[in-house]
Image (tube, rainbow, N blue to C red):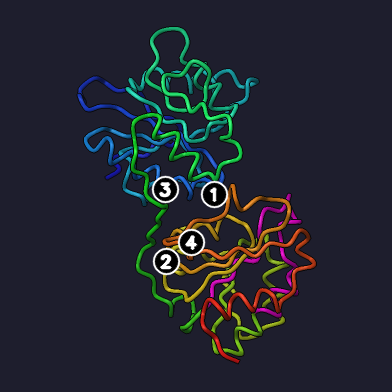
Amino acid sequence: MIDKQAEHLATESDGSDARERILVIKLSALGDVVLAMGPFAAIRAAHPDAHITVLTTRPYVDLMKATGFFDSIAIDRRPKLSQPREVLALRRFLKNGNFDRIYDLQTSDRTGFYFKLLWPGPKPEWSGIARGCSHPHANPERASMHTIDRLAEQLADAGIKDVPAPFISGPDIDLDRFGIRSPFVLICPGGAPHRPVKRWPAERFGLLAKKLADYRLTPVLIGTDSEADVLNRIDQMCPKARNLMGRTGFLDIASLAARSVLAIGNDTGPMHIAAAAGAPSVVLFSRDSDPKRCAPRGHGPNAVSIVREGDLRELTVNRVMDVIRQRLDLVD
């Protein structure tokens, strides 16, 4: 469906396309981008004949392309005020795009500034929280709402009532290419390096992987090269694990999750992908984040199990394994 991908920012419309022009803004982070998949689908359903552009950041281009909801993709470099040429380029994109409506699904101080860049002159309709916008989400409790519920209410205020659950479909995948034997459990033991308190200790994941292997389930480890210490530690503790460090992009994770019997991991972006791809999921939360506001949402009322401990160093392997046994009907 995408007819072009802007490496920087899309150029203005030449006026030859009479279709309604829509801009959707979603810049980051991975979990929030995944949670916005339902709103993306709702916006496309509400504007079936429109030309829809998404403004995002470079890491999420492939994900946006794979949705099929967007006609074009523009990459935001997040310019600073000390970069006037970049700011002016962004302003030209916003003003010359001739957008009829803009859905700001980021609703941050940054995107509030983007609304101000439209001054002076007429502004397109704008759904968000920017002061003076045409379709404000003005609920004073919005900061305490789950991301999906908040976005759904924002879109309802803009006239879009039906917002589905997030869904990601990856391409068909050859498990032999990754050396994976079924049945397998997808394990996401990493997380943001600047928030280590959101990570269950690697040694606990290693013990968990060994217990899973005892049930003839293949533990499949995913993560980036920056998480090598964690992944290699688990791999050393459980030789039957399959370590895919650095080999899985976002869409590969979706494909693997859809084929897995379960996905388990910390509160991190890949677990949002796994849940959205349909994997039964177990997500570990510390006191550092609130599942009521940001937990992954799957397909059905019991798709995601939350295990929360204020300090994840105090979360035992047996407690997590009890949840997994219940989810998979495992018998000792």
Of label 4 and label 3, which has the lower sequence position?
A: 3
Residue 99 image position (x, y, % from top left):
34, 23
Residue 117 image position (x, y, % from top left):
50, 16
Which disc is residue 263 wearing?
none
Of label 2 and label 3, which has the lower sequence position?
A: 3
Q: Quote the CA–CA distance across marks 4 and 2.
A: 11 Å
Q: Which residue matches tag 4?
A: 275
Q: Which residue matches tag 2?
A: 255
Amino acid bearing label 2: Ser
Magenta region, residue range: 185-208
Of label 1 and label 3, which has the lower sequence position?
A: 1
Q: Which residue matches tag 1?
A: 30
In the image, is residue 201 part of the stretch drawn in magenta? yes
Amino acid bearing label 4: Ala
In the image, is residue 26 part of the stretch drawn in magenta? no
Foreground residue among 141 and 121: 141
Of label 1 and label 2, which has the lower sequence position?
A: 1
In the picture, residue 283 is in which quadrant? bottom right
Foreground residue among 252 and 88: 252
Look at the numbered discs 2 and 3 and tell me whether their residues touch, using CB distance below 8 Å. Answer: no
Q: Quote the CA–CA distance across marks 4 and 3.
A: 12 Å
In the picture, residue 159 is in which quadrant? top left
Look at the numbered discs 4 and 3 and tell me whether their residues touch, using CB distance below 8 Å. Answer: no
Foreground residue among 282 and 233: 282
Q: Which residue matches tag 3?
A: 37
